[in-house]
Image (spheres, rainbow, N blue to C red):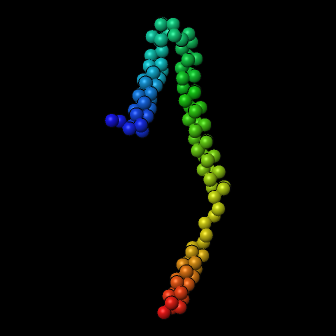
Amino acid sequence: MVSKDQMIGGVIFVVCVIVAVGYFIALFFTEPLKSLGLIQDVAGFRYWLLAIPVFIALIAVLAIGAWIGWTMLTTPPPKPIEEYKFEEEESKTEEESQESKKE
């Protein structure tokens, strides 16, 4: 039996393969598509066939850059290393003093 995640993965895979094959056919075999009457202007069709994915890729890269910038903006700076060492030494001394009080 296939799990739900595997089923979703299979559907995503099949859809991506179909889109890739369709894109390849539409980009490189535009003359047969024109002779079938599916497209009218080959040059304009090819232009938009390239322009739309480039636009989507640019927006995706800019969104990732904006997300990185937002994360850096809203994340507080880390404590300096000296403070970490000081806190570790302080906790060790507290533990030692508590152990000595128990004895």
Q: Where is residue 22 in the image (x, y as percent from the top left)?
A: 45, 21
Tell me which residue sits at (54%, 89%) in the image.
97
Where does residue 33 sit, x and y in percent of width and height?
Answer: 48, 11
- Residue closest to the eye, 69 or 87: 87
Q: Position of residue 48 (x, y in %)?
A: 57, 22
> Could you tell me which residue is drawn at 57 percent across and 75 percent down?
84
Farthest residue to the left: give it.
Answer: 1
Q: Which of these two is toward me, 98 or 77?
A: 98
Q: Is residue 100 visible?
A: yes
The quadrant of the rendering that contains the N terminus is top left
* Quarter of the figure with residue 88: bottom right
Outermost residue toward the front in this view: 102
In this rendering, is residue 44 above or below 69?
above
Pinpoint residue 35: horizontal percent, then vertical percent: 48, 6
Q: Which of 15 and 25 is in front in this view?
A: 15
Query: Taking the image as drawn, is residue 89 in sight?
Result: no
